[in-house]
Amino acid sequence: FVHVFILKNLIPEEPEPVLTVSPSWLSAGASVTLNCSVKDQSAGWRFYWYKTVPDPSDNSYSYELLHGSSSGTEQDSYIVHGQTHTAGYVCRAGRGDPVFYSYHSQPNFVWSGDSHSSASLTVSPDRAQHFIYDSVSLSCEGTSTEWRVMRLSPENRYLSDCTTWGTMTVTTCHINTYWLSDAVYWCESGSGEFSNAVHITIQRPEISSVPVPLIVGLVCGIVLFIPLLVLFRYRASNDSCCDRPVQSESDNMDCVDNEIDNYSTLLHGDVFLYETVRGPQGAGHGMDEEPEESAV
């Protein structure tokens, strides 16, 4: 264990440099600036600059040294002139004698929106913005017979090919549903060429927020409705009890008393009506008096 510990401390770990590219999208006549940074900023590093060459058969890249970079540069930046098409770059650092090299950086890219005859990318449907559930196909055209479609997310810098998020035929990548994402897409040919790049953005359906007063109103309505429902059911149950066919003895007595009162009222009403028709009776015999005749 002591020997292993000593060896680990004697052999330095290879750092992984980070490459940045500016600008990310090419414009006519503009140069491209590459910057390579190493975590260990101590002096003595020399920097080596490479251009990536696609190898679709191996799903990887090979690297070609850029002009004037075979012995490395003291500066941690490199300027590329005359770049007109999409391209990928890599850097690494080295120091000491013999030279101790770092790892290669992750590839970084400069993109061009202009297509050319040797390699081009077309998107179907032909628009830059899509919905998350859209069916999107990316087709590669050119002189090569072997292609792969790549994408790089600007947010997390994750580089992947179509086999990860779609189905690749000979020249066309069909993006699987739900795997469409905001990213830059381009084609790479078996002969080492890059196509134009397309930045696709995804429009996701917005979920409108419900206003707070509406939520409060709904809650209050539910709270008030529950007691009213309970009261209604309680009254309905009481009414059903009162409508039973069997009556108690007290209820029967009340009904008899009501019938007697109604009968008495009818009798008195008939007598009054009879007296009204007959008119007032005379005294004594109870007969109307005849008018007396006057003597002549």
Image (spheres, rainbow, N blue to C red):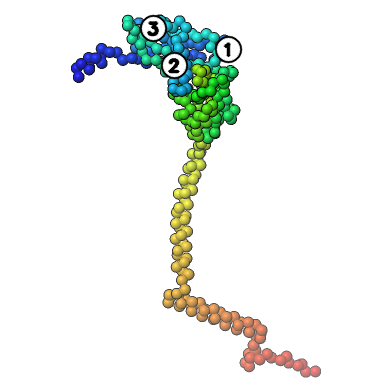
Q: Helix, strand, or loop for circle 1?
A: loop
Residue at image point 80% right, 94% down = 296
Name the residue type under label 2. Answer: Ser
Q: Nearer the viewer, residue 174 or 234?
A: 174
Q: Position of residue 10 (x, y in %)?
A: 25, 12
CA gap between label 1 and label 3 equals 31 Å
Q: In which quarter of the image is residue 279?
A: bottom right
Q: Where is residue 98 in the image (x, y as percent from the top left)?
A: 32, 6
Circle nearer the viewer, 3 or 2: 2
Label 2: few (<14), some (14–19) or many (≥20) C-alpha neighbours in 10 Å: few
Mark 2 vs mark 1: which is more N-terminal? Answer: 1
In the displayed structure, 215 sits above or below 197; it is below
Q: Helix, strand, or loop for circle 3?
A: strand
Residue at image point 39% right, 15% down = 104
In the displayed structure, 175 sits above or below 47; it is below
- Write down the residue under mark 3: 46
Numbered circle sitting on residue 62: 2
Name the residue type under label 1. Answer: Ala
Q: Position of residue 241 (x, y in %)?
A: 45, 68
